[in-house]
Image (spheres, helix red, strand yellow):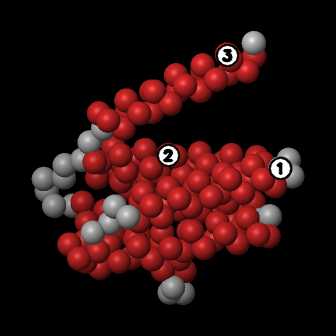
Amino acid sequence: MYASRHSAVNAYAQVGIETDVASANPHKLILMLFEGARLSITTAKLHMQRNEVSAKGEAISKAISIIDQGLKASLDVNAGGKLAGKLYALYEYMCHRLLIANLNNQPEILDEVSNLLRELNDAWTSIGQDAPDGTTNMRVTASVARFPSALGRS
């Protein structure tokens, strides 16, 4: 009985997520990707603490997939110029760090990547979906500039 109730709850949650995705504008979709990646990282950390190797690996793989196939894939490096290039490099860095965290069971790396995602999420939230004053790039650039080591600079 518990399994069927649990399945029903999961199915209901999945329908809610699919409805949110179907009705979301592009700005909201990016916010959902940030949220999903951070949730997967939090889940991975919990599994890491419990020494649940398989579940940890699955959660980290999901976070990497969201960053790589969602956030990074949504960038238009040609149109976005230098900013998009920096974000691309930052997403690459995050994926690499998550692999290291998985291989070496380093929860501090999970925290690092989660914090980077939180900072980007905050910047993305602050720009809103329409910034008519042209400050969108300036705000995101300022956030990316806070992470020079992640971009290959010291």
Q: Are marks 1 and 2 in contact (CB under 8 Å)?
A: no
Quadrant including the C terminus: bottom right
Q: Residue furthest left?
A: 132
The label nearer to you, 1 versus 2, is: 1
Q: Earlier in the sequence, mark 1 or mark 2?
A: 2
The label nearer to you, 3 versus 1, is: 3
* Amino acid type assigned to the residue bearing label 1 in the image: Glu
| Element marked by disc 1 | loop
Report the side of 102 relative to 13 (left or right).
Answer: right
The crowding category of the residue bearing disc 1, from other C-alpha atoms within 10 Å (few below 14, some 14 to 19, many at least 20), is few
Seen from the viewer's position, the closer of residues 136 and 66 is 66
Q: Are marks 3 and 1 in contact (CB under 8 Å)?
A: no
| Residue receiving disc 1 | 52
| Residue receiving disc 2 | 35
| Element marked by disc 2 | helix
Seen from the viewer's position, the closer of residues 130 and 32 is 32
Q: Residue at x 66, y 51 (%)?
A: 59
Instruction: For marks 3 and 2, give the CA distance.
Output: 26 Å
| Residue receiving disc 3 | 5
Residue 153 in sight: yes
Residue 140 image point, x, y percent: 33, 64
Image height of 60 relative to 77, above or below = above
Residue 107 image point, x, y percent: 75, 60
Residue 147 in sight: no
Q: Residue at x 76, y 69 (%)?
A: 103
Q: Earlier in the sequence, mark 3 or mark 1?
A: 3
Choose top left, top right, bottom left or bottom right for residue 7: top right
Image height of 147 relative to 121, above or below = below
